[in-house]
Amino acid sequence: MDKLQRYRFKCTLTFGDIYGQVIAWLVVLLISLAAAMGLMGARQPLYALVSVGLVLVLSLPFLLFAFVTTLVNHIEFVTVDSEAEASAASAAPVNQQPAQAV
């Protein structure tokens, strides 16, 4: 192992990747709230609150699992070529100054 390779962490996740998951979860929430409103009208407020709480408690882990698996699927480790990195560093302007607070 005479030459160690360097890797760059790259995340390619965009909002469009999770947009469908958010919409599906909002639909589930709206349906549960509609059911709760129906139960409220039927003079059973305890059942209405329990049903909304149950839907939230049961659907949140699935939403979290979907987010995490989508994020993990969009993480890449790219091998960095040392020659390309050196040429990119030499192409940078030399007269850069650090940012200063005013």
Image: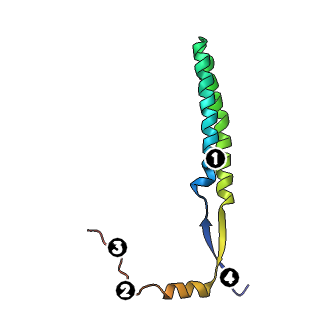
Indicate the position of residue 82 as horizontal and vertical percent values.
61, 85
The amino acid type of the residue labelled 4 equals: Leu
Q: Nearer the viewer, residue 34 or 3?
A: 34
Of labels 4 and 3, earlier in sequence is: 4
Measure the alpha-carbon separation of dots 1 and 3: 41 Å
Q: Which residue is mark 4?
A: 4
Q: Nearer the viewer, residue 14 or 2?
A: 14
Q: Nearer the viewer, mark 4 or mark 1?
A: 1
Residue 29: image quadrant is top right
Measure the alpha-carbon separation of dots 3 and 2: 13 Å
The amino acid type of the residue labelled 3 equals: Ala
Identify the residue shown where x is 66% and y is 67%.
Answer: 76
Residue farthest to the top? 43
Q: Which mark is residue 20?
A: 1
Of labels 4 and 2, earlier in sequence is: 4
Measure the alpha-carbon separation of dots 4 and 1: 41 Å
Q: Are marks 4 and 1 in contact (CB under 8 Å)?
A: no
Residue 24: image quadrant is top right
Q: Which residue is mark 2?
A: 95
Residue 46 shows up from this direction: no
Q: Are marks 4 and 3 in contact (CB under 8 Å)?
A: no
Q: Are marks 4 and 2 in contact (CB under 8 Å)?
A: no
Q: Which residue is mark 3?
A: 99
The answer to whether residue 77 is left or right of residue 90 is: right
